[in-house]
């Protein structure tokens, strides 16, 4: 049976992080009014400020939450006595309020709540961005062998900073259908950099490789978020899929100028490779597949 999860939409015009934990709470009219006014102010701060001023103003507006900082290159927040989480841009707002809930929801958005992990398991994270998924597992005291691939240089550096014990297994390379050099279209404000042109004026050349080139064995979970490039990543992963128990994939509307989803292509490909869809998350548009061969 395929299970489908539906999350409630956010209140209009409020930065999503401000509603964390409030989705199923009855909110009074005065509280809604307060949230809307504060939300507009926060949106203005996000839009027109950067760096230390951005952090100062958000810290002022959210005094009861852990402080965020800017070190001159990256945004960061202390999330434990000895740990920090780094972001290359203003996505740091994701963890401004209740970072643990953010990490829990990341797990849920990939339909991973029902999976049983052990410390011996292998997680391959294709399109890792800053490595939040591994942090989410560590937050549950699950310490897997983490192998990550992130083509964006700044996100890659943050992923290494966030996952120092796994730094030797974090690769600054784009995964594709072949080994080549391709244009890489950058999103400097979010996490949407892609090998598919989505209309940005910022692009560079980047090395691509097939996931199969790495010859990874006995994979518990292969997670893929390639910003619309999922079909090509999978086409370069046929041998790897035979070594994989579960695949979690983000196939939402992110491909190219038309922002098309890749649901049909990805679903057909994985079924042909012997996988079955277990769960579909309709808000983020992700699927969890199990190898039934």
Image (cartoon, rainbow, N blue to C red):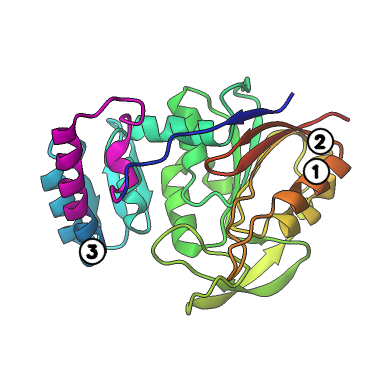
Residue with the mark numbered 2: 275
How far apart are labels 3 and 2 at the CA level? 44 Å
- In the image, residue 136 lies at what x, y percent? 47, 33
The disc label shown at residue 50, or none: 3
Mark 3 element type: loop
In the foreground, 38 or 69? 38
Q: Magenta region: which residues?
A: 13-42
Sooner in the amino-acid sequence: mark 3 or mark 2: 3
Vertical side of 258 occupied by 155: above or below: above
Mark 2 element type: strand
Sooner in the amino-acid sequence: mark 1 or mark 3: 3
Q: Is residue 211 magenta?
A: no
Quarter of the image with the N terminus in it: top right
Answer whether residue 205 is visible to the viewer in this image: yes
CB atoms at circles 2 and 1 under 8 Å apart?
A: yes
The disc label shown at residue 221, or none: none
How far apart are labels 2 and 1 at the CA level? 5 Å
How far apart are labels 1 and 3 at the CA level? 42 Å
Q: Of the residues tagged 3 and 2, which is closer to the observer?
A: 2
Quarter of the image with the C terminus in it: top right
């Amino acid at each position: 049976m395929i299970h489908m999860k539906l999350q409630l939409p956010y209140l209009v015009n409020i930065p999503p992080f401000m509603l964390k934990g409030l989705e199923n709470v009855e909110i009074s009219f005065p509280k809604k009014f307060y949230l809307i006014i504060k939300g507009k102010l926060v949106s203005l701060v996000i839009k027109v400020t950067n760096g230390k001023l951005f952090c100062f103003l958000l810290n002022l507006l959210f005094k009861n939450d852990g402080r965020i900082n800017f070190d001159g290159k990256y945004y960061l927040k202390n999330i434990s006595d000895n740990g920090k989480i780094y972001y290359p841009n203003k996505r740091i707002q994701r963890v401004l309020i209740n970072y643990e809930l953010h990490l829990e929801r990341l797990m849920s958005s990939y339909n991973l709540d029902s999976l049983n992990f052990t410390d011996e398991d292998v997680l391959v994270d294709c399109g890792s961005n800053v490595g939040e998924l591994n942090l989410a597992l560590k937050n549950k005291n699950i310490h897997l062998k983490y192998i990550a691939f992130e083509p964006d240089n700044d996100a890659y550096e943050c992923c290494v900073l966030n996952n120092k014990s796994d730094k030797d297994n974090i690769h600054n390379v784009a995964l594709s259908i072949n080994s080549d050099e391709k244009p890489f279209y950058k999103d400097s404000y979010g996490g949407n950099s892609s090998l598919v042109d989505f209309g940005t004026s910022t692009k560079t050349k980047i090395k691509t490789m097939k996931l199969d080139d790495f010859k990874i064995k006995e994979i518990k979970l292969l997670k893929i978020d390639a910003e619309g490039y999922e079909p090509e990543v999978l086409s370069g992963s046929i041998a790897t899929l035979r070594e994989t128990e579960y695949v979690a994939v983000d196939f939402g509307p992110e491909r190219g100028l038309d922002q098309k989803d890749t649901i049909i292509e990805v679903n057909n490909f994985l079924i042909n490779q012997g996988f079955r869809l277990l769960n579909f998350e309709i808000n983020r548009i992700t699927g969890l597949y199990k190898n039934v061969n």
